[in-house]
Each structure stands twice: as structure tokens, then as C-alpha cells.
Image: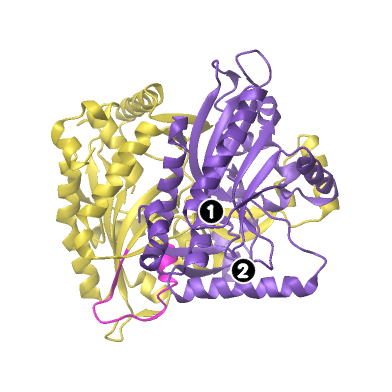
Chain colours: A yellow, B purple
Amino acid sequence: MTVTEPTTVPDTVTALDAARADLRARLLRDGVLVDIGSPGLYGRTGVFERVYGAVDAAAVRSQADLDAEVLRFPPVEPLAAFERTDYIASFPDLAAAVSGFAGDNRDHRALLAARERGERWESFLEPADLMLTPAVCHPLYGLLSGDLPVGGRTFDVLGDSFRREPSLDPMRLQAFHMHEFVHVGTAASARAHRDGRIASIRDTLESFGLEIDVVPANDPFFGRVGQVLARSQVEQSLKYEFVTPVYGPDHPATAIGSANLHEDHFGSAFAIRSADGEVAHSACVAFGLERVTIALFAAHGTDPDRWPAGVRAALAL
Amino acid sequence: MTVTEPTTVPDTVTALDAARADLRARLLRDGVLVDIGSPGLYGRTGVFERVYGAVDAAAVRSQADLDAEVLRFPPVEPLAAFERTDYIASFPDLAAAVSGFAGDNRDHRALLAARERGERWESFLEPADLMLTPAVCHPLYGLLSGDLPVGGRTFDVLGDSFRREPSLDPMRLQAFHMHEFVHVGTAASARAHRDGRIASIRDTLESFGLEIDVVPANDPFFGRVGQVLARSQVEQSLKYEFVTPVYGPDHPATAIGSANLHEDHFGSAFAIRSADGEVAHSACVAFGLERVTIALFAAHGTDPDRWPAGVRAALAL
């Protein structure tokens, strides 16, 4: 769910920043989002929720033929599961750990005294062995260790995703939701799932009146080694994004959905085997629910009652 | 959303623990919840989501006459807002802070080397100035600083709540959702809101086939000072809980909803004034959505299609 941003044309970056600030200001002014004082975190009003719910329902309808098993997870995941995904090696800058207070009355008095002196009090906390879930499907794989049935399994997973990238771009939130349709099976069934859902997702997003392109993409791997991994991901066509020109034709389009082949990354990490005895492969297609919702407000305005009839019909609004 | 537990009758505690373990085992075995390896955190299946959605919809219908303003918040809140609630003074043991990695390539290599050696790597993280939101209505008050209109304002807030209290009791989750109906206004209007909603909430929960009692309650204030605060809260009748005997008549009933008067706690902390120029008072009534849902499975069994017709009708299941 990231898009490569221009780094060599400063004028364009400035215009893009202005376009982002404009959209953010409009969403706040028209009461779609509410500023809660932290970049990339917003309160969401009734009109936002109305569109968001309609987007999610339409996304589910578009994938109903999968007859996927429904699973929902909390916004935090156990550290042990997080470690097996190796996320901290690839995306340390996006990760978020949870800590808590495990002290007694005396420790609490010391914490409050430090706070009273205007000092930070996080040093009184200890790791809680929990991470904010960075990718909605991550908690799934730990449940599948062992042998899959013939045909693999397909899941409908909706949940919270947290990525530590504060931004004033309203299309880049720190806390957001993805509705993902995940298949775990053989190399062939995983690829078939990824490739087979692209048309229905594209059709669904286009039915919302959005201009959609499907493009090869890479995850935002960290650092110098990450640049190599990102290039390799694009060269192997492992990830596609559904992008829409939220900020107009002069700026890079923004991803609002994705279709990813994980190969045996999770199968290997979580000891999952397909029915043919091989290490399982997995694939995941995803709607970025807040991104689709905000793209709709950007494209059609902040009053859904005045959106084109066809768009309202597609969203059952 | 807590209930005082017996501390003086060890035999009863043992039987209660067994009752909790029984319910947890049944919910896992019958595929309502999925164990993700951390006490108080679960995956939720389709049947859970079906009932959970029905509970939430019925809760909203029951409070529709409030015509409340809808607001939704992310599962994290800015530290600055958290500090103003003074939560760390009263409930340090339940609080959860977020930290992230802000280093460069070299720091990342050091983190990975420590991890490779089997050491903890949290020391490479820094406070992210975010807390997991402990109470769904907390982020609201910071938006209201200043003067309220005549009549105050009433909000419909649904969101994530996180409290660091790992437990094998399926009625005590670390991550859960509350649907809250919050009024901010004068001392009189806040009290009228709190008292005025009790009947409709009780009726709604009883329509689900649950045996409900409304009892004075206290929040789980920390430590020795906390015991005094808790007693005072009960003596002043600031908090009521809607409790149901999930574990049978021989064990304490469990809270599945609450009705709280905050007096001027938030009005004072967030500089909110009512239209008469006084410090605003607030009150909040809340459905604990997972607790209501699990209480329903405990009372009626794990197959909603076999629940009594009246219960299914009340839930529009």
C-alpha cells in the first residue's frame, strides 16, 4: 500500500504537498475527518463512516464467490507471532511495540514523581510482548501451522493495521483498516488466487467512479538492503497495486488496493504445508478501506448525496 | 466494565476459575473464538462476528432517539490527550504505550545483531508519543475544549479499548470494543443522560434473553490510594454496571455495560465549558460489545440458529 514518490523533481514535490494539504483541509473543513492532534490519525464522522461502511460492504460482495472463512483479529498481535514474520528485519521504521507498567505502589509513586517533574515516564514501563499488527493477515499464518487440506484455504480477514509513518497526506494514515482475501495453498493455487481476483477488484473500484490502473509495486523495505529487496519484488512481479490519481494527472497515483504473492515466505516461517507435502505458498488481495473512502471523497466531493447516481448505486448508498 | 471479585473465599475462586475455563474451552472448541497465543486476545470467527454485529446494531437502535453525533477514533491516541485524562495516575497497570524505531541503517544492524544473539531489542525503540486508547470516549474530550452549545452535545462513539490485564476469563479481554453514548453539558444534563438511558439499556439487554441487574460499581483504581477512590466512587453512585450471571448464580455476575457520571473530571481536564459558563460535566453509557456477545453464547449456546425465537427477533438474527 505504498507508492514510490518523486525524489528528483523538487517543484513537483512542492505541488504534490500542496495538493495533499488541500485535500486534508477540505476533509477537515467539510466535517469528514477530525484532527486529533497527531499526523495520520483522525477522528471519523458519520459521513465518513457511511461511505466507509458502503465501501466495505461492496468489497465483500465483490469477493463473495470465494466463500472465504471469516476471521477477525485484535489490533495487537503477540510478539512471538510478529517475530516469525521477520517484519522487524524488513520494516523496522514502521513497527510499533507495546509496553506496560508492571510495578508496585512504590514504582507507581516514582513514575508519578518523575511525571510531576516534567520528565518522561516511559522508562518505568516494560515490554508487553505485544506489537501493533502491521499487516492484517499476519496473525492468520500462526493458526495454520501443519497440513492444509486439498485445495488450500481461503480467508476473509478485516482488521486494524498500524504503521509508524506520520504524514499530513490524508491518504497515508498511521492506523487504518484493510479488508483482505487470503489464500494459503500450493504455489499454483496461490498464484491463481492473486491473479484471479485482479479483474473483480478493478471492476469494483471502477464501479465507484474511480480511474484505476494496476501496476507492479514494491513494499517499503528499509535501508540499503531494502532497496535491493524492493527491486527484486518488482522484477519478480510479486506485488501489484490498484492505483488511482487522487491528486490529479500531474502527480503519482496512490495505491488503494493490492494483490500480493508471498511465495513461501509465510509457509516457511510458520511451518505450513500444502496437501501435496510442499511448503505452502500464500497470496493476499486487499482493499485499503480508508484509502478507497478518501479517494471517493477526493473524486466526487464531500457530500455523498450529490455523487453520480451510478456511483451511489454501486455503493448501495 | 469491571466487577469486584471475591478475595476471601478461595473455594469459590477455584470454582469460578473452572467455570471460566469451561466457557473458554467451549468457545474455542465450537469455533466461536480462536486462540492466538496470548491470554485475553482472540481471533473471532464468522459466527462470532454475526452475533457481534447484531448486538451492535441493536445497541444503536436502542439509543436512536438520542440522535447522537457519530465519531470514531483509531485504537491509539496521542500521548498529550492521554496525559490530560490522568489515566496513568489511576490505572497505570492497565495502560499501554507505543514505541517505534527511529534509527538509521547502523542502528538497525545493531538491533538485528542483538536479536540474532537472542537478546530483546526493545531498547532500540523510542517512545512514539502514542498510547493504546484505554477508554473509547477519551479522544472525544480534547475536541470539545471551549464553549458548548445550549443543551450540550451527545455523541455516538464506537471504538477499540485496550487494557493490559491478561486473563483466561473469556469475559476479560485485553482488546475489546465499547459502543458508548456520551453527553457533555451541564451537571444536570449529564446526570439526566446517565440516569435516563439506564432503562433502555436494561430493556435491550433483557430482550436478548439475559438476566440483568443494575448495580453500583467502581473502576479498578490502582494501589492503596485507588482503594479510597473506588470506595468514594461507589458511595457517590457515580458508576452503575449492567451485570449478568454468566457463570451461574453461585458466582459474581459480570458487567456487560455501564452508566457513568464523570462529574467535571473531563470538563476540567480539557477546559470545556457548558453554555451557562460553568465547567462542563459529562456522562457516558456503554455497551461492552464483546462481553454482551460472549454472554449470549454462554446463555444460549454456540449456535445462534438454535437460540430462542424471541432472542433472535430482538437481535434481528
Q: Is residue B139 left or right of residue A278?
A: right
The kind of residue tagged 2 is: Leu
For disc 2, the neighbor class at 10 Å (few under 14, some 14 to 19, many from 20) is some
**Looking at the picture, how far across and down is residue B160, in whole percent?**
52, 48
Q: Nearer the viewer, residue A289 or B221?
A: B221
User: Which quadrant of the rendered structure holds the C terminus of chain B?
Assistant: bottom left
For disc 1, the chain is B
- At a point 32% along the width and 43% down the height, the residue shown is A53
Note whether B282 is above or below B276 in the view shown: below
The residue wearing badge 1 is B176
Marks 2 and 1 sit apart, C-alpha to C-alpha, by 15 Å
Q: Is residue A182 left or right of residue B273?
A: left
How many discs mark residues in the rendered view? 2
Residue A247 seen in render = no
- Say whether disc 2 or disc 1 marks the residue closer to the N-terminus: 2
- For the magenta stretch, what is the residue range? A138-155
- At a point 42% along the width and 47% down the height, the residue shown is B58
For disc 2, the chain is B
**Looking at the picture, how far across and down is residue B276, in whole percent?**
64, 13
Residue at the bottom extreme of this rendering = A277
**Looking at the picture, how far across and down is residue B72, in whole percent?**
46, 38
Magenta span has A193?
Answer: no
Q: Nearer the viewer, residue B195 or B160?
A: B195
**Looking at the picture, how far across and down is residue B145, in whole percent?**
59, 22
Q: Secondary structure at mark 2?
A: loop
User: Is the Cβ of the residue at disc 2 closer than 8 Å to that at disc 1?
Assistant: no
Q: Which mark is residue B168?
A: 2
The kind of residue tagged 1 is: Phe
Magenta span has A143?
Answer: yes
Note whether A274 is above or below A87 in the view shown: below
Q: Are marks 2 and 1 on the same chain?
A: yes
